[in-house]
Image: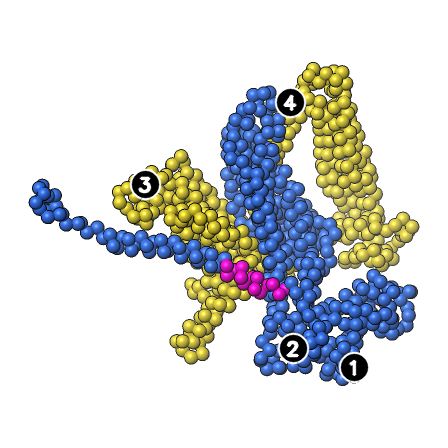
Chain colours: A yellow, B blue
């Protein structure tokens, strides 16, 4: 019986239990519901919870544990010469056993091969079913595969029996407990609260998952590449071509990637900060309600456009435009000048990213500026300051911590941005201060190391996790600091 | 002292102190101008961006096709009449030849004239093979009958018709030759060559030929993922926010959860891709490129957005509602689920739609879990390899051919249209159901 069928049976039992519980509770008090401790639906839910929750829990545990157990058992019965081999070799044999087992299952009973079939005979039969056997199979594997299949089958039967029996037991137990005095509501509500707590701990689990999954892969990476080479190396050259040669590990220097990331983020902030700040100030202090109600949502549309669209925009419009523009400028200076801005460059990526970040700066700062109390504004204006003087000398200093927090949040977004730089910044990892040349970023390299079919154990792919962890901690630090500043500031005027 | 503070009325009016009013007003005007310029800058680039996409992409919705009277000639498809024994015969037959023969007839070309026939063959898309094959396989009665069919023109013809090629350059340097242009003109003149609405863009899967490439698979993949995001992150997000907002005691643990959620909202999306790769694919052994994995990764990403929106909506429900419910004897659970949550539902819904819209446009994490796949067939279940709309855009943006720029922009228009519909729905819901207490 498949897992989904079992779950369906259990849920159906639970639903039946719900109706039984409702009618049982009513009949106990002869329809006089007010004599019950809880409303009848809670008695129904009580049976439902008892019939469903323990059963599903056991089914889940069983489904996780059983394949591991079967695998271990089959492995134990492999011939001695296989067991004496290395772990990697054993895993390979087990993979073949697994695919034979899968193939045998797809065969219908009449063309299932005889017990003494050899691997040479079995291979074409399985290939016909679309199951390719990798490597050189051996005949003992068929025995193991059969053993695996029969164990899996009996495990599944047992799972079905146990789970459904458990569900029935829960059903009956709960039914027998129902009396008019049973505090069904409190118990059911306890379960609901428990579910709520589980749901809110998923947020924590996500963070834990991020940190641990990346930490474990990163330590594997650092076991083949020294940590100092990664953090202080100035050459990025992972050498894909020689990935099979263990001696050519390549060089994994973080510095050029980090420099590119920070440089592009800096250019982006150069565009986004003045534009975003000035539009926030204008919107908060000068604009009438009409302009505000039109311009603010329109600017926020910029934040809703997916970053891949910005990447495309940089690739087909901004990049070629800057390249052609620079060709014309150098054409004025000297005849037949070449374009000094390349289509993929720090400038292109940074500029387009800056446009994307405008709404982040402007709406965050807008909120902060409007939070500055009106009395400060009025006081300054009453002393005869012009509005711009009020903004510059009273409002901005008062809002400064909040604005700084907003800018830090924006910067962390610029550092973690991926699609724009993948399409517009280039892939060459190098150190340069010329913004007209391509540089690459941490995020670009994560993408390029992990797309394509690569062996998962090589440092070439594992480095992506080290890069990701670095990125995670940089943005985390920026965010925590920014949230701290923003929160501290908010309390000032409340 | 007497100069500045006159003590009697006979003295002249005091000299005005020079407080630089002129400069100050000029500075004021400059300051305002900067503000206006900043807003104009933002709006200009919004307009430029949309204009770029629309002007490059609207032609993708029309695809040049050629009208041909195609005879399903048995001597070409199945000369030895063995299709009953070998069904593969119908699938592997030389269908392009049928279309080519029909084209020669239409243009009056001698089938033996190698130069002319070669030029004419290049007008028809290679996709004609599958088109004609599917027609015949679904309706075997067509054998030896003549049928009027619109077949796709090749990508080069399409680009030439749409003016994407510069036809004034020397013939040897362009992909479409003079004699082909002359044929196209003749076809156009009798109405056999025209742009027709491009349904293939919405239904086809990946293809290396621009004229038969479409976002069909990507739309299905994205739809699966949105469904998974909705089914997982909405219940979990709502449950988490209810706990944090209504039940949680103020202590260290709930504080940590709060800070955590705020941070998760700002974690770069690519990090979620790494998480998905390490946990779902390597550890849990789920298949690569599957929309299930993509959906789970996007769910984790969307969760903070939904939690933050739901908590705001729950906060907006006035305490008097809670007090009233508790006062007439409701339990805390009943108070939340019978009174507070229904009142907060519009806010929750709005937040969910906005979260879904974010997830729909997300690309980076999907690249890492192998959704950059060349998928031709529509995925039947969320476990099959699929791709997503933004990933399809990314893949097309990397294609060199001119016609793919148009496809990319067309796909972006489709994506933006979905996003616009979702966001407008969210705004509408907010306006319609928002209550001010």
Residue at point 44%, 70% (across, down):
A326
Chain of the residue displaying label 1: B
Q: Which residues are magenta?
A: B47-60
Q: Label 3: how many residues lie within 10 Å, few (<14), some (14-19) or many (20+)?
A: few
Residue at point 65%, 52% (across, down):
B222
B284 or B273: which is nearer to us?
B273
Residue tagged 3: A378
Q: Which mark is residue B176?
A: 2
B106 or A172: which is nearer to us?
B106
Q: In the figure, is residue B248 to the left or right of B216?
A: left
Decide: marks 4, 3 in contact (CB < 8 A)? Answer: no
Chain of the residue displaying label 4: A
| Residue B53 within the magenta-colored segment of the rendering | yes
Residue tagged 1: B111
Residue at point 25%, 54% (across, down):
B22
Residue tagged 4: A186
Q: Which badge, 4 or 3, is on the more N-terminal residue?
A: 4
Residues marked 3 and 2, same chain: no
Q: How many marks?
A: 4
Instruction: Look at discs 2 and 4 and give the one toward the viewer.
Output: 2
Identity of the residue furthest to the front in this view: B10
Instruction: Look at discs 3 and 2 and give the one toward the viewer.
Output: 3
Q: CA distance from mark 3 to mark 1?
A: 89 Å
Q: CA distance from mark 2 to mark 1?
A: 20 Å
A337 or B27: which is nearer to us?
B27
Decide: marks 2, 4 in contact (CB < 8 A)? Answer: no
Residue A436 screen position, x and y as percent = 45, 66
Decide: marks 4, 1 in contact (CB < 8 A)? Answer: no
Above or below, A169 against B364 in this view is above
Instruction: Look at discs 3 and 1 and give the one toward the viewer.
Output: 3
Above or below, A447 against A49 in this view is below
């Amino acid at each position: 019986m498949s897992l989904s069928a079992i779950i369906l049976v259990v849920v159906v039992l639970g639903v039946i239990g719900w109706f039984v519980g409702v009618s049982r509770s009513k009949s106990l008090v002869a329809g006089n519901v007010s004599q019950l401790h809880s409303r009848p639906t809670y008695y129904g839910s009580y049976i439902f919870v008892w019939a469903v929750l323990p059963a599903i829990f056991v089914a889940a545990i069983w489904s996780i544990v059983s394949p591991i157990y079967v695998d271990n058992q089959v492995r134990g019965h492999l011939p001695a010469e296989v067991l004496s081999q290395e772990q990697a070799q054993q895993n390979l044999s087990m993979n073949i056993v697994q695919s034979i087992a899968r193939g045998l299952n797809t065969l219908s009973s009449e063309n299932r091969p005889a017990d003494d079939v050899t691997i040479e005979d079995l291979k074409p039969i399985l290939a016909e079913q679309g199951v390719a056997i990798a490597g050189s199979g051996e005949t003992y594997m068929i025995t193991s595969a059969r053993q695996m299949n029969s164990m899996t089958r009996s495990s599944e039967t047992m799972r079905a029996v146990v789970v459904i029996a458990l569900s029935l037991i829960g059903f009956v137990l709960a039914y027998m407990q129902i009396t008019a005095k049973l505090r069904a509501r409190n118990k059911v509500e306890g379960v609901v609260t428990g579910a709520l707590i589980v749901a809110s701990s998923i947020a924590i689990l996500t963070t834990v998952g991020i940190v641990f999954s990346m930490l474990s892969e990163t330590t594997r990476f650092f076991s083949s590449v020294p940590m100092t080479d990664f953090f202080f190396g100035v050459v990025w050259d992972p050498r894909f071509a020689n990935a099979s040669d263990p001696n050519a590990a390549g060089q994994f220097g973080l510095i050029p990637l980090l420099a590119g990331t920070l440089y592009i983020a800096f250019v982006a902030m150069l565009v986004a900060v003045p534009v975003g700040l000035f539009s926030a100030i204008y919107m908060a202090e000068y604009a009438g309600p009409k302009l505000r109600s039109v311009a603010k949502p329109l600017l926020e549309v910029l934040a809703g456009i997916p970053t891949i669209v910005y990447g495309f925009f940089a690739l087909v419009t901004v990049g070629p435009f800057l390249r052609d523009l620079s060709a014309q400028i150098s054409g004025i200076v000297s005849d037949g000048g070449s374009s000094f801005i390349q289509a993929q460059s720090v400038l292109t990526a940074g500029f387009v990213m800056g446009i994307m970040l405008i709404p982040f700066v402007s709406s965050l700062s807008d909120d902060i500026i409007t939070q500055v109390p009106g009395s400060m504004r009025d006081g300054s204006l009453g002393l005869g300051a012009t509005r711009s003087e009020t903004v510059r000398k009273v409002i901005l200093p008062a809002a400064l911590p909040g604005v700084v927090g907003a800018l830090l949040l924006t910067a962390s977004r610029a550092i973690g941005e991926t699609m724009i730089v993948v399409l517009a910044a280039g892939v060459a990892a190098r150190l340069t201060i010329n913004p007209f040349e391509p540089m690459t970023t941490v995020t670009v390299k994560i993408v390029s190391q992990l797309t394509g079919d690569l062996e998962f154990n090589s440092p070439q792919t594992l480095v992506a996790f080290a890069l990701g962890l670095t990125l995670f901690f940089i943005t985390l630090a920026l965010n925590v600091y920014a949230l701290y500043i923003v929160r501290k500031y908010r309390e000032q005027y409340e | 002292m007497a100069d500045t503070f006159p003590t009697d009325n006979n003295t002249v009016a005091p000299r005005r102190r020079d407080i630089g009013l002129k400069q100050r007003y000029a500075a004021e005007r400059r300051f305002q101008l900067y503000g206006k310029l900043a807003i104009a800058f933002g709006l200009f680039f919004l307009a430029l961006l949309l204009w770029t996409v629309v002007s490059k992409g609207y032609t993708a919705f029309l695809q040049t096709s050629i009208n041909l009277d195609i005879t399903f000639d048995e001597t070409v498809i199945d000369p030895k009449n063995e299709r009953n024994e070998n069904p593969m015969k119908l699938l592997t037959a030389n269908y392009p030849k049928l279309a080519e023969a029909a084209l020669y007839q239409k243009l009056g070309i001698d089938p033996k004239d190698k130069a002319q026939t070669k030029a004419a063959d290049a007008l028809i898309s290679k996709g004609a093979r599958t088109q004609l094959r599917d027609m015949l396989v679904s309706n075997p009665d067509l054998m030896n009958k003549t049928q009027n069919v619109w077949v796709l023109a090749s990508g080069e013809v399409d680009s030439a018709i749409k003016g994407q090629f510069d036809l004034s350059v020397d013939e040897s340097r362009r992909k479409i030759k003079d004699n082909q242009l002359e044929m196209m003109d003749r076809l156009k003149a009798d109405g056999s060559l025209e742009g027709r609405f491009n349904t293939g863009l919405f239904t086809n899967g990946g293809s290396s030929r621009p004229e038969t490439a479409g976002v069909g698979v990507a739309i299905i993949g994205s739809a699966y993922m949105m469904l998974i995001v909705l089914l997982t992150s909405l219940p979990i997000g709502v449950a988490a926010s209810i706990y944090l907002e209504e039940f949680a005691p103020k202590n260290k643990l709930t504080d940590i959860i709060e800070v955590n959620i705020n941070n998760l909202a700002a974690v770069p999306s690519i990090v979620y891709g790494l998480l998905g790769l390490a946990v779902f694919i390597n550890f849990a052994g789920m298949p690569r490129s599957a929309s299930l994995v993509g959906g789970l990764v996007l769910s984790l990403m969307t969760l903070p957005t939904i939690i933050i929106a739901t908590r705001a909506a729950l906060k907006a429900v006035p305490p008097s509602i809670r007090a009233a419910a508790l006062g007439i004897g409701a339990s805390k659970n009943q108070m939340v689920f019978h009174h507070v949550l229904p009142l907060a539902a519009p806010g929750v819904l709005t937040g969910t739609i906005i979260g879904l819209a974010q997830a729909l446009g997300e690309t980076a994490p999907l690249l890492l879990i192998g959704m950059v796949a060349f998928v031709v067939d529509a995925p039947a279940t969320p476990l099959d390899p699929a791709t997503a709309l933004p990933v399809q855009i990314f893949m097309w943006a990397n294609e060199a051919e001119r016609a793919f720029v148009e496809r990319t922009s067309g796909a972006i228009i489709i994506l933006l249209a979905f996003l616009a519909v979702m966001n407008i729905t969210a705004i509408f819901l907010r306006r319609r159901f928002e209550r001010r207490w």
